[in-house]
């Protein structure tokens, strides 16, 4: 009797594992529809999904059933997944959608808190930046103001030199006395 009870428990556990894979598939389907990857990334993600599911199933087999894998138990997993997808998937999708929306809201809230903390930490440095910019602009303005007479003098000298050069270049030779 003990052997038959163990077989029923193993079949029931495999049915539960199949339903669990169905829940994981619904989560994966929601995330894939939300992210909308291209064709190639979808293929890679599908492959990774089934690899993860295989690792989970065989990990559960080794922990729950002491590594005993039979063909009948492996055939019950797709039945459990099909039962979940047929009867429970529609009822579970809305709570999953709400859960992932809540998770996304929590993620955005944490990002806002981190951004606020970053701004709060960098606020003194920003104030220091504005003070330094003000000081340097004031010093540069005073330097420009102090060199203004020199600039004006150099501009006046340049203008006078240009006028003198034009005068020299356009000067006519003295008229020779008539012969």
Image (cartoon, rainbow, N blue to C red):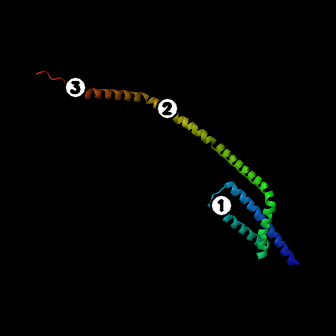
> In the picture shown, does residue 21 fall above or below 140?
below
Residue that badge 1 annotates? 42
Closest to the observer, 49 or 137:
49
> In the picture shown, does residue 174 fall above or below 47?
above
Q: Where residue 68 sits: x, y (%)?
A: 77, 76
For residue 42, what is the image quadrant?
bottom right
Question: Callout 3: helix, strand or loop?
Answer: loop
Q: Where residue 152 sits: x, y (%)?
A: 40, 27
Residue that badge 2 annotates? 141
Query: Residue at position x 81%, y 62% from top?
Result: 87
Question: Callout 1: helix, strand or loop?
Answer: helix
> In the picture shown, does residue 7 fall above or below 34?
below
Query: Residue at position x 79%, y 58% from top?
Result: 90
Q: CA distance from mark 3 to mark 1?
A: 89 Å
Q: In which quadrant will I find the N terminus?
A: bottom right
Q: Nearer the viewer, mark 3 or mark 1?
A: 1
């Amino acid at each position: 009797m003990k052997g038959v009870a163990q077989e029923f428990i193993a079949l029931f556990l495999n049915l539960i594992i199949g339903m669990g894979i169905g829940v994981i598939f619904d989560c994966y389907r929601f995330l894939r529809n939300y992210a909308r990857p291209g064709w190639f990334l979808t293929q890679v993600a599908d492959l990774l999904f089934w690899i993860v599911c295989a690792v989970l199933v065989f990990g559960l087999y080794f922990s729950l059933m002491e590594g005993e894998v039979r063909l009948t138990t492996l055939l019950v997993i797709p039945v459990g997944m099909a039962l979940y997808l047929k009867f429970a998937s529609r009822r579970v999708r809305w709570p999953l959608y709400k859960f992932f929306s809540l998770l996304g809201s929590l993620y955005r809230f944490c990002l806002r808190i981190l951004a606020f903390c970053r701004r709060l930490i960098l606020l003194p440095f920003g104030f220091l930046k504005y003070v330094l910019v003000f000081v340097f602009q004031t010093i540069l303005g005073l330097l420009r103001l102090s060199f203004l007479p020199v600039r004006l003098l150099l501009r006046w000298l340049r203008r006078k030199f240009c006028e003198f050069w034009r005068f020299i270049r356009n000067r006519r030779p003295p008229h020779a006395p008539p012969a």
